[in-house]
Amino acid sequence: MPELREYENKIAEVCWLVCKKKYLQRETKLFSEEAIFQIFRIFCVLAEMSSDSMEHSYQVFLHPSEVSIIAQALASSVGCIFDEEDFNNLSISMGNFRLAPFIAVLESRCIPTVKEDIAIKEAITDIYQRIVEDVIKKGYLSKKGYIFPTMKEYWFVLRPSELTYYKTRSEKDKCDTLVIQKGSRIEPLSTGYKFILHTPAEKHFELGAPDHMTRLQWISSLQLAIDHSDQVQSYQRLQASKRRLQRQGRIQEMMRARAQLQEERNARQLAEGQAKELEAVVREDSKKLSELLDVKIKLEKLLEEETQAKRDEEIVRALQARVLAEEWEKREELERLQEEQHKILEEERKRRKQYEERQKENEKELQSAASKLAELETEKESLDVELRNAREKIVLSEGKKELLETQLNQYASISRSGDGVRRAHSFMPSTKEKPIFLEVRPSTLKRPIKK
């Protein structure tokens, strides 16, 4: 597998020398020349080839689903948001992608806001290693040494047929390569986050992960590498072939469903045509039957009309006699009602005259009541003045009372602080003040009740 990969790399470099000028001369260059070459290699691995019968040539294109996978991986690596709905609309309008549109989509949809070239380079390199170099997983693991039984951390790179580890992440100082074959197996250890890789050559490599989740990921990836270690074709090409077969299967299923739908549509149209013919026959029979029923109904209706006409003639004669008798009765009743109406009109005139006289009397009484009300208002105002004067006198008497109480308290304190001689003082006034009587009259006015 490494020799085959090296041979493929040389062929790709020759092809790139032939066609790179076309793809490097662009207006907006967000990718470096190395990144464009890596994208070219990714495109060659995942692309499909179809023959053009008109030009006797082949066309290489990339399916939109494969473009979406690469674009999402690139956007996720550089921390950008991939608008899947916008890409779906673009793929519907474009169809399959050639290399130049593929590069343009990656530049415009995945890294439009990324300014760091290092981040773009690392993201493209990761995708390149995963797709082209068939790298299943990369990361730090601890490995037990051969001579000294201590765990030392290395940078591991896993491919379907080998597990290579380096001193640093730059992958420049290669330490060794562990060959993975079909008979290899993984044994998880209960102590720590360690596991052992057993090879068919009776070699055992003890490895350690930093946490439980990382150990599970590495065990799963190693098992995947063991399962595909004997494959001639690379793992990513196998996955691309599976996706291509799935797409073809979906297309065939859609074609079968479309053909079945067309058959059902044809059968339904045939059944609808037969139903329309039967419906036309039934409609014609129904039309004839309805015409016969109409004739029968018309004959029955004519017979009923003739019978009814005879009955109506007899009824009309009887009604004419009755109407004449009722007219005489109504005439007499009308004359009687006219006399009663004359009497009612006379009585109404008398009542109206009495009402007018009574209204005049009420107006006179209303005027007299208004004059009395004005007098009462004047009296109320004079009473309000008297009430105000009385309140002022009350306030004045209260002030005198408080003054007397103050003087009384002063005399009492002087008598207690004297020489012991107690004298009786009368603080009662020698002359009686005339008490003030207030008569409060109600201010409400009541209209005298007529008896």
Image: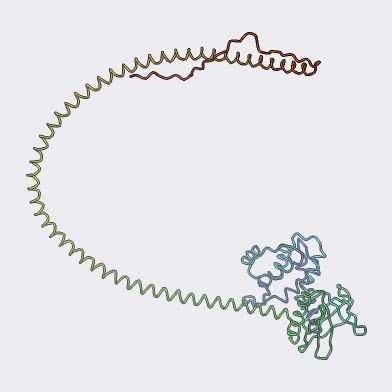
Q: Is residue 344 above or below residue 388?
A: below
Of 74 and 269, the residue lying toward us: 74
Q: Residue reaching furthest bottom?
A: 201
Q: Residue reaching furthest top?
A: 431
Looking at the image, residue 352 sits to the left or right of residue 111; the answer is left
Q: Quadrant of residue 223?
A: bottom right
Residue 6 seen in the figure: no
Residue pictured at 86% horizontal, 72% vertical: 170
Residue pictured at 25% horizontal, 20% vertical: 354
Q: Is residue 90 above or below residue 384?
A: below
Q: Name the image quarter holding the C terminus.
A: top left
Q: Name the image quarter holding the N terminus.
A: bottom right
Q: Position of residue 283 (x, y in %)?
A: 29, 69
Looking at the image, residue 92 sits to the left or right of residue 28; the answer is left
Of 71 and 418, the residue lying toward us: 418
The colour style of the image is rainbow
Q: Position of residue 109 (x, y in %)?
A: 71, 63
Residue pictured at 63% horizontal, 79% vertical: 245
Q: Is residue 165 above or below residue 409?
A: below
Of 256 and 397, the residue lying toward us: 397
Looking at the image, residue 443 sits to the left or right of residue 213; the answer is left
Q: Position of residue 91 (x, y in %)?
A: 64, 67
Q: Is residue 319 above or below residue 414?
A: below
Q: Quadrant of residue 135?
A: bottom right
Q: Position of residue 244 (x, y in %)?
A: 65, 78
Residue 210 seen in the figure: yes
Q: Quadrant of residue 62?
A: bottom right
Looking at the image, residue 325 sits to the left or right of residue 87; the answer is left
